[in-house]
Amino acid sequence: MAKIGTFGGLSFAVSSNKVSTFDDLKWDTSAAYATHDRHLQPDLLEFLGPDPEQITFKMKFSVFLGVNPLKSVNDLRRMVREGTAERLGIGGRVYGDYKWAITKVSSAMKTFDNRGNCWAAEVTVTLKEYGRR
């Protein structure tokens, strides 16, 4: 099994029996500014500091890729509800300055069999930078 990366107990890996990877990783960096109104002059911006960074990515879970979609979605839901903060490592590199927390999981349950078992799901995961205390 080729391990691509990890986020705590969540592994991104590929093998001949199982595919559990991500697509469309997007990393947002922004800063906070205050705007001060000035009479007869352009407003003045004041840098307040960096906002927490955010990463989003998509994952596909399918029984045809060797993954139980419902279990995988529930594992992500549990991480959101427990406030799990972990390091994100991909390809031997650590992303960000410290840890990340999953703030949102949006799941689209795509395919079901005639007994109501979920066969495929697409998930969008949102991570937010978890700063040091």
Image: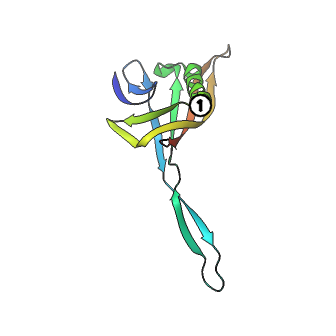
Please give the count of numbered marks on the rendered protein: 1
Q: Farthest residue in the top direction?
A: 115
Q: Quadrant of residue 11?
A: top left
Residue 78, horizontal then vertical, whole percent: 59, 25
**Image quadrant where one finds the N terminus:** top left
Residue 2, horizontal then vertical, whole percent: 33, 25
Q: Quadrant of residue 110?
A: top right
Residue 4, horizontal then vertical, whole percent: 36, 31
Crowd around label 1: few <14 · some 14–19 · many ≥20 (10 Å): some
Q: Quadrant of residue 73?
A: top right
Foreground pick, 52 / 26: 52
Residue at position x 43%, y 40% from top? 98
Mark 1: amino acid = Val
Residue at position x 42%, y 20% from top? 18
Foreground pick, 26 / 113: 26
Foreground pick, 97 / 92: 97
Residue at position x 52%, y 30% from top? 60
The vertical placement of 38 against 104, above or below, is below
Q: Farthest residue in the front direction?
A: 133
The vertical placement of 13 against 26, above or below, is above
Q: Secondary structure at mark 1?
A: helix
Q: Is 5 on the left-hand or right-hand side of 112?
A: left
Q: How is the image coloured?
A: rainbow
Residue at position x 61%, y 69% from top? 35
User: Pointer 1: what residue?
Assistant: 80
Residue 27, horizontal then vertical, whole percent: 47, 48
The vertical placement of 105 against 75, above or below, is below
